[in-house]
């Protein structure tokens, strides 16, 4: 099987359920995965998978390397024409949606599945070992994922630090705090938050550049709570079952909210209002989200999970 992943990292996580479903229907064939280089590690523990990097388009080199293969199924969830560059007995390709719906719902319909194809990640022993070494200990764990592809999707580092202080002074007193980043661009942000917390006596581990995505998934499995922006890490946290609060601004949570059993999204103004004013102030949408609102939503998530 050939699997062309979405270009967006968060959407790639959301698409892992559709991938698992296709593999199951084909009796676990060998799988060739074409994905963003940053996403390749997510598939490391999947059996019989070979990954090839791409950056949103099928290069001539990739077409040459894979063009001699004939696939039983080519599954293109990026929505481009790349799937037609390869020989396949059957093709399933994502097309632009006419109806606004969550990506998991869209892919469930595309695959013809009877129930929602929730994200599914395979985590190996190496990832769990790396997670344990990066954040040793036990007890409550507060994970923060403050990064994002663009500044317009990021809540301010100062507010992340303020929310963490409130929670560790309250229901998560004594909790370990870890800062996670999905890419090198996030390192400065996680470092700033960790420094701010440390200055106030709140011990925080800065893992902004220290874990790959699969090791981050292993760590997030243990999280008492994850708070982050609309990024790959909040999608991963939700997929592995962590209580996950995701902060939205210029992107639409109705389409791309993290998907899992214990998730909640939070925004300031309605998305339609923000979309209508696009370009006036790209950071204003995230600034509408207050520390008070984040604290209240976090408490609701914690209480729903039985923490009093």
Image (cartoon, rainbow, N blue to C red):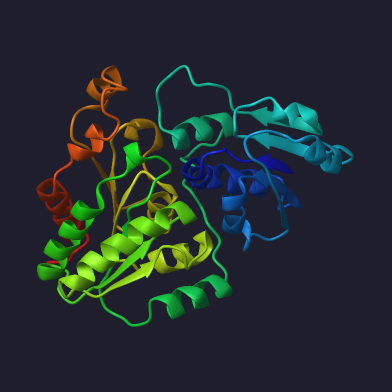
Give the residue at x 22% y 65%.
196
Q: Is residue 108 left or right of residue 5?
A: left
Direction from residue 120 to residue 270 in the image, left or right: left
Residue 2 in picture, x, y percent from top left:
73, 42
Numbered disc total: 0
User: Which percent across, then down, holds residue 232?
Assistant: 44, 49
Identify the residue at the far right of this view. Answer: 68
Percent from the top left, x then y, of residue 20?
Answer: 60, 49
Going 45% across and 80% down the picture, which residue do you hit? Answer: 133
Give the residue at x 38% y 76%: 135
Q: Is residue 104 left or right of residue 225?
A: right
Q: Nearer the viewer, residue 139 or 130?
A: 130
Determine whether, in the image, residue 106 is placed left or right of residue 295.
right
Q: Is residue 169 above or below residue 21?
A: below
Q: Nearer the viewer, residue 213 or 121?
A: 213
Quadrant of the rendering where the N terminus is positioned: top right
Q: Is residue 306 visible?
A: yes
Residue 221 appears in the rendering: no
State the image quarter where residue 308 is shown: bottom left
Q: In the orientation shown, which residue stands out farthest toward the bottom?
A: 137
State the image coordinates of residue 254 (x, y, percent, origin top left): 34, 31
Residue 149 in the image: above or below residue 222: above
Which residue is drawn at the image coordinates 19% and 62% (left, top)?
Answer: 164
């Amino acid at each position: 099987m050939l699997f062309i992943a979405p270009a967006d990292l968060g959407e790639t996580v959301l698409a892992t359920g559709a991938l698992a479903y296709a593999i199951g229907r084909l009796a676990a064939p060998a799988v060739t995965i074409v994905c963003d280089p940053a996403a390749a590690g997510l598939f490391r523990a999947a059996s019989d998978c070979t990954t090839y990097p791409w950056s949103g388009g099928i290069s001539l080199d990739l077409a040459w390397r894979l063009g001699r293969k004939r696939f039983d199924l080519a599954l293109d969830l990026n929505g481009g024409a790349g799937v037609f560059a390869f020989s396949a007995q059957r093709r399933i390709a994502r097309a632009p949606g006419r109806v606004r719906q969550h990506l998991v719902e869209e892919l469930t319909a595309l695959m013809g599945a009877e129930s929602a194809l929730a994200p599914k990640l395979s985590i190996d022993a190496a990832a769990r070992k790396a997670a344990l070494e990066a954040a040793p200990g036990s007890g409550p764990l507060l994970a923060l994922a403050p990064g994002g592809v663009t500044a317009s999707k990021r809540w301010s580092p100062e507010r992340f630090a303020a929310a963490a202080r409130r929670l560790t002074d309250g229901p998560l007193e004594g909790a370990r705090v870890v800062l996670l980043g999905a890419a090198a661009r996030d390192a400065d942000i996680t470092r700033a938050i960790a420094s701010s917390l440390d200055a106030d006596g709140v011990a925080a581990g800065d893992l902004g550049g220290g874990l790959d995505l699969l090791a981050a998934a292993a760590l997030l499995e243990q999280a008492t709570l994850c708070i982050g922006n609309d990024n790959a890490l909040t999608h991963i946290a939700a997929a592995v079952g962590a209580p996950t609060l995701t902060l939205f601004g210029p992107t639409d949570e109705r389409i791309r909210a993290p998907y899992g059993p214990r998730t909640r999204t939070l925004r300031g103004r309605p998305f339609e209002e923000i979309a209508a004013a696009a370009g006036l102030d790209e950071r204003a949408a995230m600034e509408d989200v207050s520390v008070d609102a984040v604290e209240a939503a976090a408490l609701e998530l914690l209480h729903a999970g039985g923490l009093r």
